[in-house]
Image (spheres, rainbow, N blue to C red):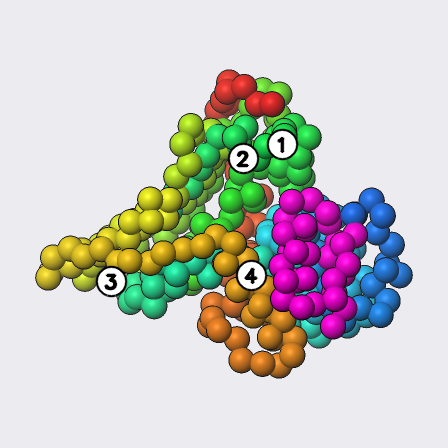
Amino acid sequence: MKIAVIGAGSIGKRHFDNLISLGADAILIHYRHYTPDILDGCDAVVIATATDVRVSLISDAVDRSLPMYIEKPLAFRAADLAKIELLTQEVADRTILGLMMRYHPAFCVLADMDMSNVARFSFDIGHDVNQWRKNWKFSNSYAAKVDGGGVLLDLCHEIDMASVLFPDLCLKSVHSISHPRHIGIDFSSRLTLQTKSGAEGSIGMDYLTPQVHRRTIIYGADAIYDFDFVAQKYEIKDAKGSRLMELPVNRDAMFVDLMKDWLTLLYNGKISNRLLPRISQLGASTKLTAKAWEIRQFVGETTKEML
């Protein structure tokens, strides 16, 4: 099976390496060198470019009936989502989005819990963007683009996680903080949401905090779930008391396992994870992300130095 990986940044290179390790015949193509004819003779394609150029790439793949692995987010405007939905009907069941947190063992545990009696919840993630990668500058990256950049799109895993646990979420507001040198780009965003049963919650993400954090807390009538994904401390409190769960995680393995399930899907095999993010089943998640980006209200600015 020949697979083209379009986009030679850090995530594209990761996907290429994983494909090679899994025995696929993969080629890595820098977006600057991409032409549609490169896809001729391929069996599938990985799209790991900046978000704002993906619609035409998806169209090229669909013209050749190629299933895709598309990096998240799928799109940041509702109009583009609708266009992609129409384009990909033929291959949607074999096309996935790179939402690798669905392969985190702790999140898989949460996804199997009964959330019907939840009263409130919070999802939070953040880290100083200047510390992300060696020799990496925010101002030169995809993240600094007005169209397709910003923290809400970059760290949208939490939006997807919330949509898995609470499929009927209604978005109430999005408040964001920008930067005087990067107007229109959110460095911190907070979503407020509500389920149809009245449970209220928030999703917060930032490029600012000095220490990396990722934590989900869910308060219900039956249990409290306090999952710290950075400390790998996963606590469940219920009427019987409190217990900690041992759920060791290997970040690289999440990427590999997601890629492995996609390849298995292409060969019509049995996938390992029911949460496999096929775009045919991602309507709630992708629409929530795009709507959140579109209704951002910028309520302030940060003066933190951004390289």
Disc 4 vs disc 2: which is toward the camera?
A: 4
Image-based side of 198 in relation to 240, left or right: right
**Where's the N terminus, which quadrant?**
bottom right
Q: Check whether the beta carbons of the residues at disc 3 and disc 1 lie within 8 A of each other.
A: no
Which SS class for mark 2? loop
Q: Where is residue 156 in the image (x, y as percent from the top left)?
A: 51, 48
Distance between the Cα atoms at labels 4 and 2? Answer: 21 Å
**Which is nearer the N-term, disc 4 or disc 2?**
2
Which is nearer the eye, 56 or 238? 238
Identify which amino acid the numbered label 4 is placed on: Val
Identify which amino acid the numbered label 2 is placed on: Trp
Does the magenta segment cover residue 275?
A: no
Q: Where is residue 34 in the image (x, y as percent from the top left)?
A: 84, 51
Distance between the Cα atoms at labels 4 and 3? Answer: 34 Å
Which SS class for mark 4? helix
Identify which amino acid the numbered label 1 is placed on: Trp
Which is nearer the eye, 72 or 39? 39
Q: Where is residue 8 in the image (x, y as percent from the top left)?
A: 73, 47
Which SS class for mark 1? loop
- Residue at screen point 53% across, 38% down: 151
Give the extent of the magenta segment.
Answer: 1-29
Distance between the Cα atoms at labels 4 and 1? Answer: 24 Å
Residue 256 is marked as 4
Question: How many neighbours does mark 3 have within 10 angstroms: few (below 14), some (14-19), or many (20 or more)?
Answer: few
**Which is nearer the N-term, disc 3 or disc 2?**
3
Disc 4 vs disc 3: which is toward the camera?
A: 4
